[in-house]
Amino acid sequence: MNNEALGSLNDIDPNYPTPQVYDFLARSDNSAFLEYVFNDPFGCHVFPGDVPDYPLPSFFEDMDREIKQAKQIHLWAYIPTCRYRCHFCQYPTVILNPKAASSQVVFRDLVDYNIKEATLWLQKVPSLAQAEVGEFNIFGGTPSLLPEPELRRLMGFYLNHFNFSAATMRFEGEPGSLTKSYLLLLKELGFTKISFGAQSFDDRIISACGRMHSAQECVDTIRHTREIGLDWVSVDLIYGMLGQSVDDVKFDMEKSLELELSHVVIAKLHMEEFMKSRTGVSGERQSHWQRKGLININNMTFPGLGKQYQMRELIEQYLSPGYREHPTMYFHQNHLESEKWKGLITDLEKQYPEVAIGLGGSSKCTRAEAINITDYNAYKQALDEDRLPIEGSRGISPLQREVNAFKMALSTLVPVNDTVFKQRFEGRSFYDNPIISHTLKTLVEKALVTVDGDLVSLTPNGVTLVEAVINTQFVTPQA
């Protein structure tokens, strides 16, 4: 077993209970789980294909067929501009001063390229124009840096070329640029959901992240959205950050309840080593913390795994009375709906296609997936040559489609229902799949799931370790 990982697990705050998952991770026969959670930066939702170098024409055919059959799809646009790079960021971004004259050219180019990419998608996948968009998201980066004329131009294109008849619209920004006037613009354009990263409500932690906003600005942004009638606000928090203690997370939870947040995303951050690819937007850079040697400055260090799981249990303790976690890391008030876009792509009865437009986007259906280029210059070059900026594509074999469907369903934390699975796969039970059936035996033995008839449910340890379960356990059984 990795002694460094075990040492990290033993980093426990004596003022809080030993985390429930400690005994499981400390056992030598569970070393694969410990290795994964020690090296995992964010709880990545990864459901990769297993057929490399899949021909792009086949990918487009698969997308066209499944989009035509789907009740709804998830459509998102990625705007990679940022005023600065957060210290933990590993995503492809274009850093600029939004007030500089030169930046206005960049904003115009970004919208031009996004529209061109979307136009090429409509040409390659004809069913996309008629498909009912379930939810449309503008993600970042910091899309709230887009000047009003460019945002209006971008939305004019999407509203005129896609079927938004039943779509909800969600916009991601950051407190420094989600001003009251900008929020009013978003409401006018039809956005009803606002999301932004606070990371913490403690200015000391915010500063250690390299963020250039205050906790008060986060609170003001929440207040402004409510004042203008936008009640759906999702705030991103992170635990496991530089200098963060279990007490700090307790403070963030108390503040979250005080603010009565409708939705909150709480991600684990562990900085020992970033995954090299397949992050949220397929970034491959080192973080500023690593590259600039900022760790250990002012005696600030990262909390070990033991403290991180104490933080996770504290989050559950505070939120479980009034919130439901669905899917993993995404919390919503009990009387409100969960994240619609996540449900569209992960709920077992849905798992519809998603199309991503922009730098580093990830598009997929059940049969294939494609990842966009993450280098901005290469991205522009591809579009200048009238090519979709796809870096690579993978197919998904029939057996792996079932495995991915099961894993996505597990990630929702909802019991996986074999009756629904059979409806999805022409009567095939998940027990008919050798990878799933073999893995279930292991997960039951390790007390990570329980099986009751047609239902497979995660135990408390299974909920905590669901990402490790998904990303380490589903392998072809040895003959």
Image: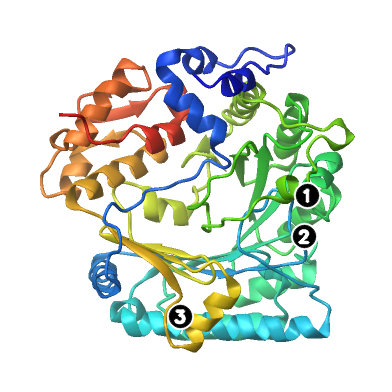
Q: Say what amino acid the circle numbered 2 marks.
A: His
Question: Is 270 displayed left or right of 366 in the figure?
Answer: right
Inter-mark Cα distance, 1 to 3: 37 Å
Q: Is residue 470 above or below residue 116?
A: above
Residue 152 can be seen in this image: no
Q: Of the two numbered discs 2 and 3 on the same chain, state the one appearing first in sequence.
A: 3
Inter-mark Cα distance, 2 to 3: 32 Å
Residue marked by disc 3: 118
Q: Position of residue 294 (x, y in %)?
A: 80, 43
CB atoms of marks 1 and 2 within 8 Å = no
Q: Name which quarter of the figure residue 65 lies in.
A: bottom left
Q: Of the two numbered discs 1 and 3 on the same chain, state the one appearing first in sequence.
A: 3
Q: Secondary structure at mark 2?
A: helix
Q: Which residue is located at x 45 percent, y 21 percent?
A: 31
Q: Say what amino acid the circle numbered 1 marks.
A: Lys
Q: Secondary structure at mark 1?
A: loop
Alpha-carbon neighbours of circle 3 within 10 Å: few (<14), some, or many (≥20)? many
Q: Name which quarter of the figure residue 473 lies in.
A: top left
- Which mark is nearer the camera, 1 or 2? 1
Q: Is residue 294 above or below residue 190?
A: above
Question: Is 430 displayed left or right of 333 in the figure?
Answer: left
Residue 132 can be seen in this image: yes
Residue marked by disc 2: 224
Residue marked by disc 1: 292
Q: Of the two numbered discs 1 and 2 on the same chain, state the one appearing first in sequence.
A: 2
